[in-house]
Amino acid sequence: MDFTIRPQVEDLRLKVRAFVDREIIPLESDKTNFNEFENLKLSLRDELRAKSKAEGLWAPQMPVSRGGLELPMAEQAVFYEEANRSIFGPAIFNCAAPDDGNMRCLEMVATDDQKTRWLQPVVDGQVNSSFAMTEPHPGGGSDPGMIQTRAERQGSKWRIYGHKWFISGAAIAKHFILMARTDLNPDEKRRHLTAFMFHADQPGWRIVRRIDNMGPDEHGGVCEIEFDGLEIDDADRLMEIGDGLRLTQIRLGPARLTHCMRWLGLSKRCMEITQDYVSGREGFGIKLGERETVQTALGELAHDIQIGRLLVMHAAWKLDQGVRARKEVSSAKIHVADTLHKAADTGIQLNGARGYSNDTVLEWIYRYARCARLVDGASEVHKMVLARFYGKEGTDFWQWG
């Protein structure tokens, strides 16, 4: 397990850091740069996307042949952490969810023709995408085996009927990946789902509502969607019939880890804001940063962030070796989600009323951080995954190999 960073990747990291400091962080202090959902206006996002492309900082996860940087997972961790030192960073470098996970998935499993039609426009930044899987009860959430949305075959076409909700990015997405049942036989537990692609302009579906939440909202929010006969060509099916569960595993494992990479960047930003404040703020004749209680809080947080970085790097390294790394990804997801919330909470506490106000992005990060323990599998589900592995492996759970 060698986490040495190539010199060219270290140079890239410094370029990302400089771009974030120069071009992106200054936007956070002016609320006229925000849309009504507390995110960066799309017009500004697209201006900065053009700049990041020009500086060679675009689509770190995609092949060079598609206009990306083709970084392996361990090196993506370096890039993503720097990118998300700003709340707006990942969207500007085209490594934000859900596009990030969708691009990665399509690059791995789509046919060449499908990549040309469905993937390349997302890589180029021409369209946004969405992944439609989660459903209200009794449908599928953390357990995709419960998915109720069905696809009925009619010759070379499929018709989709069903209900999805909390679908990230759906309000602005043009390209969608959809999970639906294609075999309603209850005995076919592993072969009952199939993945399809559709365009926002196709009839037979609608956004019921953009779901309000404690936010702030990512671009496109989280939406509730109904399907009432959406017609999809069989040519727009991903992988084989019955491969849908396999596709979700291909997509969600790396996507969980890239979430963690980004969250570490936000955690570090919380520390930066807080360290800057306590270094100058005085009370009762002493700087806050000289108080032992403050030093203990910041030291503990730095410790937790470093643990998170090592967990992420270990999981990324295993993925780069071609291992699924389910245990490692789940461990990283649990710890980093907790760390992000702790970083924002500690930042607000040590900044006092300033942290609770809109004068910094700490309150923005705090509200955003609460979703980290829910998205891509609640923390309880990942702890259950680890318990199952331990039940199966015993002390070999901690094997080095």
Image (cartoon, helix red, strand yellow):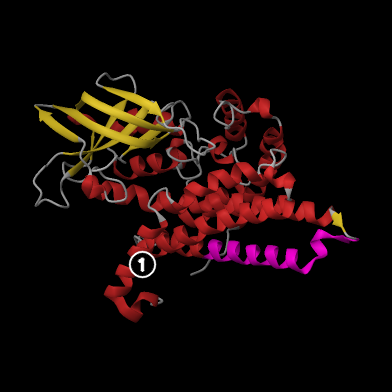
Predominant SS along the magenta part: helix
Relative to 380, residue 231 above or below: above
Residue at 36 percent of width and 67 percent of height: 386
| 227 vs 357, nearest the viewer | 357
Relative to 202, residue 13 above or below: below
Q: Which residues are magenta?
A: 285-310
Q: Amino acid at mark 1?
A: Leu
Residue 357 position within the rendered picture, expressed as x and y whole percent measured from the top left: 70, 41
Relative to 47, residue 21 above or below: below
* Residue 8 visible in this rendered orientation of the protein: no
**What secondary structure is marked by label 1?**
helix
- Residue 136, image quadrant: top left
| 259 vs 167, nearest the viewer | 167
Q: Which residue is mark 1?
A: 386
Residue at 60 percent of width and 45 percent of height: 365
In the visual, does 32 lie left or right of 141?
A: right
Residue 31 position within the rendered picture, expressed as x and y whole percent measured from the top left: 67, 29
Relative to 401, residue 375 above or below: above
In the rendered image, the residue lying farthest to the right is 285
Residue 89 position within the rendered picture, expressed as x and y whole percent measured from the top left: 59, 40
* Residue 295 visible in this rendered orientation of the protein: yes
